Amino acid sequence: MKTVFEYKDAKAKSVLIAGSFTSWKDKKMTKKDGVWRTEVYILPGTYPYHFTVDGKKKLAPDKPKAPTGDSLISVN
């Protein structure tokens, strides 16, 4: 299922996303109007992930937190 990830930070110079759905490999996000965005095809399930913003790990503010300290997303 196509899943859209967004991270709002108009001042950021680079935003990457990594999660169990990318085998923890960084995926570049693109910026438009201050919002960083990417699409990932994910099978239904629950996945930990995080953003890397200008070299620093960041969590999604609107998502639950995994025991590993990452954000969680559930895909139906």
Image: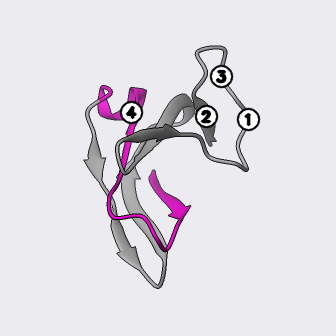
* Amino acid beneath label 1: Pro
- Please report contact status of discs 1 and 2: CB closer than 8 Å, yes or no: yes
Residue 5 is one of the magenta-drawn residues: yes
User: Mark 3 = which residue?
Assistant: 66
Residue 3 is one of the magenta-drawn residues: yes
User: Mark 4 = which residue?
Assistant: 21
* Amino acid beneath label 3: Ala
Rendered location of residue 43, percent (x, y): 45, 37
- For this view, does 51 lie left or right of residue 40? right
User: Mark 2 = which residue?
Assistant: 71
Q: Dot 2, crowdedness within 10 Å: few (<14), some or many (≥20)? A: many
Range drawn in magenta: 1-24
Rendered location of residue 5, percent (x, y): 49, 57
User: Mark 1 = which residue?
Assistant: 64
Q: Which residue is drawn at 53% across and 36% down?
A: 44
Above or below — where is 40 with respect to 70? below
Q: Single out the residue that lies furthest toward the bottom.
A: 33
Rendered location of residue 6, percent (x, y): 52, 62
Closest to the camera, between mark 4 and mark 1, is 1
- Please report contact status of discs 4 and 1: CB closer than 8 Å, yes or no: no
* Amino acid beneath label 4: Phe
Q: Dot 3, crowdedness within 10 Å: few (<14), some or many (≥20)? A: some
- Please report contact status of discs 3 and 1: CB closer than 8 Å, yes or no: yes
